[in-house]
Amino acid sequence: MKIPPKLNLTGSGRKGWHGGILTGQLKNAVRTQQKLIYFVSHAGMKNLASSTQVFSCYFDLYGYNHPMAASKPLFVIGIAGASGSGKTTLTEIILEQMGSEHIALLPHDAYYRNQDHKPLEERLKVNYDHPSSLETELMIEHIHQLKAGRTVQVPVYDFVNHTRAKETNTLEPKRLIMVEGILTFVEPKLRQLFDMKLYVDTDQDICFIRRLRRDLVERGRTMDSVVNQYLEMVRPSFLEFVEPTKRYADVIIPEGGLNQVASEMVIARLKSLIHG
């Protein structure tokens, strides 16, 4: 489709999409915030039926104050800390209090590299607490796409078979992007994308007990495999990679989601960004 070089926005200026009339030669323009499609012509604008198929190439290319500006992520939050520290609990509390309609959640562990080409015996030997086990470059690309107002396909990781599942999860852009994982602050290119960095700090004996329970119940591991993995990989990687990134945090939260005072302070700040 040939895109005209200019459109005239009349009516209420920056709020022209809500109160004004968009005129020009563009035949198809869309609004994605509420999944509404607008067909635009010289006659003005007509609101059509709801649709999940949207198209906003004109505005992406020419940088106009288009409707996606209302739904583009304004803030990127990074949450890091040891395995079992309470990151997930904190994330769930933020999602519950803020509403999932405002937050695009990107778990870092969804980006473990695909290992279909390896036999299971080799997959079991991989150190999943080492930065090289993660396709962080794909996560960075997805964050940039979300910030640009585009939908992404987030990988799904199979923790039983230690490889990626065939399916993906569709994630749409939201006002906030929340990234959570043990190695979230390690990669500088990822770290520099965060507007707020939270580090969850919990005693390592508590972390180990939580991890043990999780891996036995949720991931089908044996007691020996969990203990051996912790001693050989998890703890050494924590000391080498995770704990040093605490210095990058804007806020350090002891006990993560169990720290009600800290959780409420973070949520209050995020609500001010959404509604303030």
Image: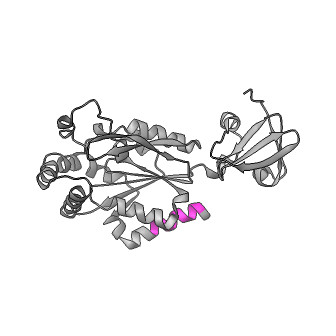
Mark yes or no: residue 165 visible. yes
Residue at far bottom of view: 261
- Magenta range is 265-274
Q: Main secondary structure of the magenta part?
A: helix
Label count reads: 0
Residue 50 pos. (x, y %): 69, 50
Q: How is the image coloured?
A: one colour
- Viewer-nearest residue: 192 or 97: 97
Q: Is residue 267 magenta?
A: yes
Q: Residue at x 17, y 36 (%)?
A: 121
Lateral position of residue 27 relative to residue 144, left or right: right
* Image quadrant where residue 62 sits: top right
Q: Residue at x 14, y 50 (%)?
A: 225
- Viewer-nearest residue: 194 or 34: 34
Which quadrant of the rendered structure holds the N terminus? Answer: top right
Vertical comparison of 46 with 100: above or below: above
Lateral position of residue 128 relative to residue 121, left or right: right
Residue 159 pos. (x, y %): 28, 47
Vertical comparison of 180 with 205: above or below: above
- Viewer-nearest residue: 155 or 194: 155
Mark yes or no: residue 185 visible. no
Q: Is residue 185 magenta?
A: no
Which quadrant of the rendered structure holds the C terminus? Answer: bottom right
* Image quadrant where residue 65 sits: top right
Q: Residue at x 45, y 70 (%)?
A: 264
Residue 119 pos. (x, y %): 21, 33
- Viewer-nearest residue: 35 or 231: 35
Residue at far right of view: 43
Residue 190 pos. (x, y %): 41, 42
